[in-house]
Image: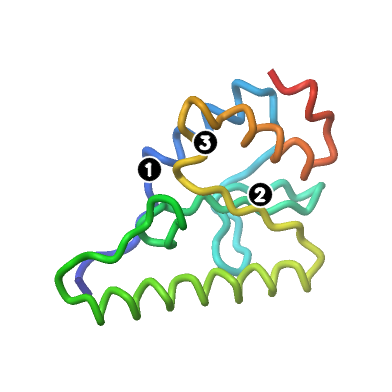
Amino acid sequence: MSLIRSRGNHTTELRMVALLRANGLTGWRRSESLPGSPDFVWRRERVALFVDGCFWHGCPRHGHTPRSRIAYWAAKLARNAKRDRRISRELRAAGWAVLRVWECALRPLDRGRTASRIARALGRDASAVL
């Protein structure tokens, strides 16, 4: 486990890129050096967007604790959630709006709601989202 290095969830991030482009939500950048390394950043609007995987970040609907090494995984997932809360607090204290979107919110049925939520955070007309 210690040999596995985090490289982001490429396919999930690409689904978010497709959602942003399809809904005309432009102006974002990736790989910005901010606490927690947000997946997408709108500097002018000071919005940081994290796309959290359901397993690694403990989605209440789809997250689960593996059946083997239960104590290890429970502690690991709890640490991840605690780190996410700390990073969100740090960014908000620095004047950033923080959005956390679950991986499952990129499913076809939920994409419109997710795009509207991002548009509202950016101060854009959510009804104009395609």
State the residue position of label 1. Answer: 10
Q: Secondary structure at mark 3?
A: helix
Q: Nearer the viewer, residue 31 or 95?
A: 95
Badge 1 amino acid = His
Q: Amino acid at mark 3?
A: Met
Is 36 above or below relative to 17?
below
Q: Foreground mark, 3 or 2?
A: 3
3 or 2: tag closer to the N-terminus:
3
Residue 114 lies left or right of residue 116; in this view the side is left
Circles 1, 2 touching at the beta carbon (< 8 Å): no
| Res 123 → quadrant | top right
- Label 1: state its secondary structure: helix
Q: Position of residue 11 (x, y in %)?
A: 37, 38
**Residue occupying the point 42% across, 76% down:** 78
Q: Nearer the viewer, residue 130 or 31?
A: 130
> How much space separates mark 1 and mark 3, taking CA atoms?
10 Å
User: Mark 1 touching mark 3, by CB under 8 A?
Assistant: no
Q: CA distance from mark 3 to mark 2?
A: 13 Å
- Left or right of residue 14: residue 37: right
Point out the tag, 1 or 2, that comes first from the N-terminus. Answer: 1
Residue on which the image places disc 2: 41
For this orientation, the residue located farthest to the top is 130
Neighbour class for label 2 at 10 Å: few (<14), some, many (≥20)? Answer: many
- Say what amino acid the circle numbered 2 marks: Val
Q: Earlier in the sequence, mark 1 or mark 3?
A: 1
Residue 114 spot, x, y in % from top left:
62, 36
